[in-house]
Amino acid sequence: MTTTPTRRAATRPGRPPVVDLATWQAERDALLLREKAHTHEGDAIAAARRRLPMVEVDGSVEVVGADGPVPFVSLFGDRDELLVYQHMWHDGAPHQGQCEGCTVTAWHLKDVVYLRARGVSFAVLTEGAWDEVEPYLAFMGYTEPWYSVRGVPDPVGERMGSITCFLRDGDRVFLTYSTTGRGVEPASGAFALLDMTPYGRGEEWQDTPDGWPEGQGACWYWRLDGDGAGTWGGTGRPAPQWTRPGVTRETTLGRQGHHH
């Protein structure tokens, strides 16, 4: 199977009311005022982010990548800014047993050419041992740099499931920003796109009109079985894995331990 399995949804009971174009445009314009206010507030928050203080970290601490141990400061390359995603890891797990939530973010960040064009370096950090991480990267087809930070103290290590930003001043390295939970959603464009659609993410926490389909558990579509059904059981994989050549159906996650 080389494409993500899908299920044809049953006819859904909820539909928006049908109106003429002029009525639709008037309601769309009213919503646009709220959207613009939301965008402007986001700009103001970003401005406040740029005014946060920073804290110095040890840039000489070693992380392990494809070329072996290297100092953390080397991840900047010839740039002054570095953005990292910190990927959870389940020790000893087969590919299908790795973190589905972190896969959401890492899969969306397979190509960060625009970050580099702006002068921002990028890397994925994980607590997994490099000898386990390396074959996983080959399976997933990731080409952006990954590094093992096993045993490295916070904030370079330990802060898994986070997007973290660093600034370099010569050989000195500083932590400037970090976010976790839903704060990492900006990296995953699918969420914002789903929020534009009539049925949204299809999750039960959403505010939907009366009589519309009931949502499923949060994140249900992050892990699918071979028939496209959402499942957190042993037959599921992180959804992007179904696109990988030669992928097979499985019956167990095979998780032995994990690092967060």
Image (tube, helix red, strand yellow):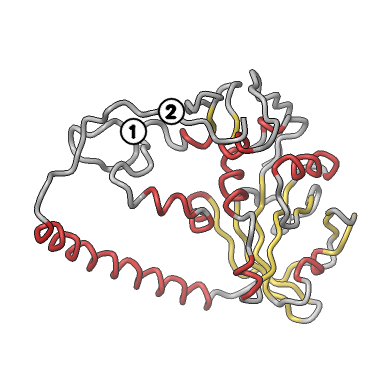
Q: In the drawing, does residue 198 fall left or right of residue 225?
A: left
Residue depicted at x 43% and y 28%: 7
x, y percent for residue 254: 70, 24
User: Quick check: 249 above or below 69?
Assistant: above
Q: Quadrant of the N terminus?
A: top right
Q: Which mark is residue 156?
A: none
Q: Residue at horizontal 67%, vertical 35%?
A: 98
Earlier along the polypeptide chain: callout 2 or callout 1? 2
Q: Give neighbour class at mark 2: few <14, some 14-19, many 20+ (Cα, 10 Å).
A: few
Residue nearer the viewer, 197 or 173: 197
Locate residue 20 relative to residue 140 in the image: left or right.
left
Q: What amino acid is labelled 2 in the image?
A: Arg
Type of residue at label 1?
A: Gly
Percent x, y for residue 23? 9, 58
Name the one closer to the observer, 42 or 24: 24
Label 1: state its secondary structure: loop
Up/down of 82 relative to 136, above or below = below
Residue at x 35% of width, y 50% of height: 195
Figure disc tally = 2
Q: Which residue is mark 1?
A: 215
Quadrant for the C terminus in the image: top right
Q: Are marks 2 and 1 in contact (CB under 8 Å)?
A: no
Alpha carbon separation for disc pair 2 and 1: 16 Å
Residue 255 placement (x, y as % from top left): 70, 27
Disc number for residue 7: 2
Q: Which image quarter: residue 92?
A: top right
